[in-house]
Amino acid sequence: MGRIVKLFDSGFATRTPLYLGSRRFDEVSLWLLGYEFACSEIEPTEISDFDGFREWLLMEVGGPGCVGWEGIILEKFGRESEATEQFFILFRRFRAVADQLGAAAIKRQYSQFSNDRSLKKKDAAESE
């Protein structure tokens, strides 16, 4: 269990305004990105709890493939506190899968998902 999961287990998800003064997703996501960066500086060999989250999100909810996990949430759910709630729900679901399968397996699944999606697009373009 990494530092992000420990933070969330300590009540961050339910008491986010106490940490940040806001529950708006655009502010929460920036804070989490900074926290994740600081954790990587403290312990550079520790694998991030977000490892594989972007790929999992793309398979679960779709979204633009050219952005990070925070961009997918912003695109799908907006900037307000409702998006923050969706983020915490999705992150808990992701961690359950990641704890069972591992991030490497999720990334392999995403690779297959991405290849299949590319083939479907190519087939659709050729049939027109």
Image (cartoon, rainbow, N blue to C red):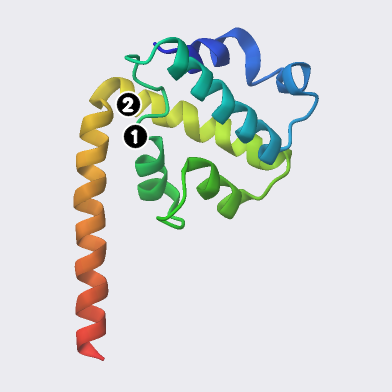
Q: Nearer the viewer, mark 2 or mark 1?
A: 1
Please identify the quadrant where the C terminus is shown.
Answer: bottom left
Residue marked by disc 2: 98
Spatial CA span between label 2 and label 1 = 8 Å
**Residue 116 in the image: above or below residue 11:** below
The residue shown at (80%, 24%) is: 21
- 39 or 8: which is nearer to us? 39
Residue marked by disc 1: 52
**Residue 78 in the image: above or below residue 4:** below
Which comes sooner in the sequence, label 2 or label 1?
1
Residues at circles 2 and 1 in contact by the CB criterion of under 8 Å: yes
User: How far from the left and from the top, in percent, is residue 69?
Assistant: 48, 41
Q: Amino acid at mark 2?
A: Ala
Q: Quarter-wise, where is residue 54 in the image?
A: top left
Seen as rendered, the residue at the extreme front is 41
**Residue 21 shown left or right of residue 5 in the figure:** right
User: How far from the left and from the top, in percent, is residue 86?
Assistant: 59, 38
Q: Amino acid at mark 1?
A: Gly
The mark total stands at: 2
